[in-house]
Amino acid sequence: MKHDTDEDLRREQKAIKTFVSVFGGSFKKLDPLDVDYKVFDKDQKLIAYVEVTVRNKSVKQAFPLLVEATKIAKLVEKRLNPVLVWSCEDGIIYGKAFNLMGELKKGGFPPPSDLSGNCELMVYYENQKALKYIRYI
């Protein structure tokens, strides 16, 4: 499990604000043991759950995107429009979890040098049509 730094949390906030600005919505941060956010439309109706992952690369260099498999499992259990968002240095990449194709592998943040040691199941996503991009202004 990756522990978020203050910078990671700042970038996560910037990403979720950018995401909800697309449709004039709002968000609520959830418990650290839950997914990251509940997302509401402009009328305050719950429309989605979002998991944000900080990626310390530009949008162009971010692939493959990765997320801990346990986080995806929690997200899709919510059933209501599970969305994955990656916060890159210059923008966000996002997509609906059920529309994405990924590959499950051993890995971690950062990838361990010795894969026989402590590592997690991670899902790796290559660039695909179901992913959308928003550059930061």
Image (cartoon, grey):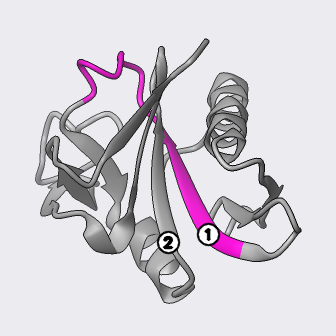
Residue 63 placement, left or right of 31: left
Residue 114 placement, left or right of 109: left
Which SS class for mark 1? strand
Residue at x-position 45% and y-position 80%: 76
Amino acid under disc 1 = Tyr
Quadrant of the rendered image containing residue 28 = bottom right
Provide residue 119's location: percent of width, then percent of height. 27, 54
Residue 50 placement, left or right of 14: left
Is residue 99 found inside the magenta-colored segment of the image? no
Provide residue 18's location: percent of width, then percent of height. 65, 34
Can you tell which mark lies on residue 133? Answer: none
Q: Residues within 10 Å of mark 1 (few under 14, many from 20)?
A: many
Q: Is residue 78 above or below residue 1?
A: below
Which SS class for mark 2? strand
Verify CB contact (< 8 Å) between mark 2 and mark 1: yes
Provide residue 97's location: percent of width, then percent of height. 36, 68
Provide residue 24's location: percent of width, then percent of height. 77, 47
Judging by the rendered image, the residue that carries numbered circle 2 is: 82
Label whose residue precedes the other's in the sequence (2 or 1): 1
Can you tell which mark lies on residue 49? Answer: 1
Asked whether residue 34 appears in the rendered view, the answer is: no
Residue at x-position 22% and y-position 39%: 112
Residue at x-position 62% and y-position 35%: 15
Q: Is residue 42 above or below residue 135?
A: below
Q: Residues within 10 Å of mark 2 (few under 14, many from 20)?
A: many
Point out the stretch of residues depicted in magenta: 47-62
